[in-house]
Image (tube, rainbow, N blue to C red):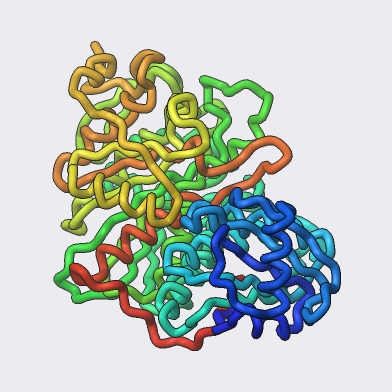
Amino acid sequence: MDFQLKTLSLAQAATEKADALIVLSASSDDGATSPIATLLAQARETDDLPAKAGKLLQLYRPAGVAASRVVLVSVGDGSPASVRTAVSAGVQAVKPGNPKRVVIVFAQSVDASALRQAMFAAADATYVYTTTKPKAEARTVRQLVLGVPEAATLDAAFRESSATVAGIEFAKEWGNRPANHCTPTLLAEAANALTELPRIRCEVLGPKEVAKLGMDSFAAVAQGSAEPLRFIVLRYQGAGKDDAPVVLVGKGITFDTGGVSLKPAAEMDEMKFDMCGAASVLGVFRALAECKPAINVVGLIPSCENMNDGAALKPGDVVTSMSGQTIEVLNTDAEGRLILCDALSYAKRFEPAVVIDIATLTGACVVALGGVRSGLFSTDDTLAAALETAGEQSQDRCWRLPLDEDYAEGLKSNFADVANIAGRAGGAITAAKFLQRFAGDFPWAHLDIAGTAWKSGAAKGSTGRPVGLLMAYLMNRAAPAGVAPAAPAAPRKRKVR
């Protein structure tokens, strides 16, 4: 799908040739005279277009409008969240007609935040997974034009949003792949393919290199699978060599049976999504290569399967982490923290400015926050506040949970330095407390995305979260204080693959 940004008034939008025209209207429009403005005024007067965000009125070949189908959609108060709701509703309304060129025009002024959400919503509504489906079912919308009162003022936001959409869709595509199409080896190949893009390097370590590093905790999780583990190291160089990088660590369990602590059969297929933390890191690097911000970023992805055979890790086994700390494995289904702890220890060698790990870590976080917000834990208030701000900016929200030392009591072990689980109470917090033991040398944050990384039911599929949050955080960090991130040199028209 091509995104295009264009200066369009309502009068100009009426002459745009398109399969569908979506008009985003606030409850108080500017009163301009044009066929579309007249339609809006009449719809408001007759209460056919309520002011609530997402309410809409569909029209077929209205007089004076070139587009065959027109959808008038309310954006309520015009907030970014309301714009996202409105665009999603509008695009869903026109999708049954299989439009190839869709124009979305704002009937009032629009800021960068609203434009960003319009693009995210349109991309999300038109995304179609294709890797293992017939090509005939690919997305039908080929070009999406965003009409705004003055395109030049929103050019930088448009470019950044286009890149972020590309990253989100990359993360979605890999998150949605079934486990036999997304092994650790294939995930490593996907990471390595990103080196064809600007400023990205990749190194892939296998079982021998991981053993040599002393990552016995990571290796122990992989030992029950026929698929060899991979430790992926991505680097994006956008700033000087001496600038400390932001390190992103993504959990890459490409399938999780639970190991000997076997999961129930129902919905076990969704455990292919247990690598969505890794997918989000890949998505960020896909976006960084397009945005080219002045920042250094390292991505670390420990990837393996959690399977059963005669060599599989057993409850009660004690393993030694890269840090030298021993871990009593009381539950083999708490494997994510066992691979992340070694990746966090590895992160220290980069002398990072901050480290953020992203993981589908605990069902307890789903119970606590549902699918609305990701769980946020951090040892650094400044980092936590920056991530919360980025979450609000991107509408990819998170919620900070505590790290009181009292929560670590349940992780005590008679046979090792630490156990890998505590009791049921506060499970998301005790998991974070486990990881905190391996992140004492740098500012650290943990994002538990177990509730937000994918949807179940009829809408089953990866969400691409938290690529939006992470990109907003990185772009904010790359920009000088008080200055918006600079736009990279590139044509305004962007293609999202």
Question: Left of 183 or right of it: where is 202?
Answer: left
**Quarter of the figure with residue 323:** top left
Residue 135 placed where, x, y %? 79, 65
Quarter of the figure that contains the N terminus: bottom right
Residue 122 placed where, x, y %? 62, 62
Question: Left of 254 or right of it: where is 436?
Answer: left
Q: Residue at x 66, y 51 (%)?
A: 50
Residue 42 placed where, x, y %? 72, 64
Q: Nearer the viewer, residue 136 or 118?
A: 118
The answer to whether 470 is drawn above or below residue 288 in the figure is above
Q: Nearer the viewer, residue 127 or 76?
A: 76
Question: Left of 178 or right of it: where is 443?
Answer: left
**Quarter of the figure with residue 10:** bottom right
Q: Residue at x 40, y 54 (%)?
A: 469
Q: Residue at x 47, y 57 (%)?
A: 80
Q: Nearer the viewer, residue 332 or 64?
A: 64
Q: Is residue 293 visible?
A: yes
Quarter of the figure that contains the C terminus: bottom right
Q: Is residue 318 visible?
A: no
Residue at the outermost front position: 45
Residue 272 placed where, x, y %? 60, 41
Q: How many marks?
A: 0
Q: Residue at x 72, y 60 (%)?
A: 43
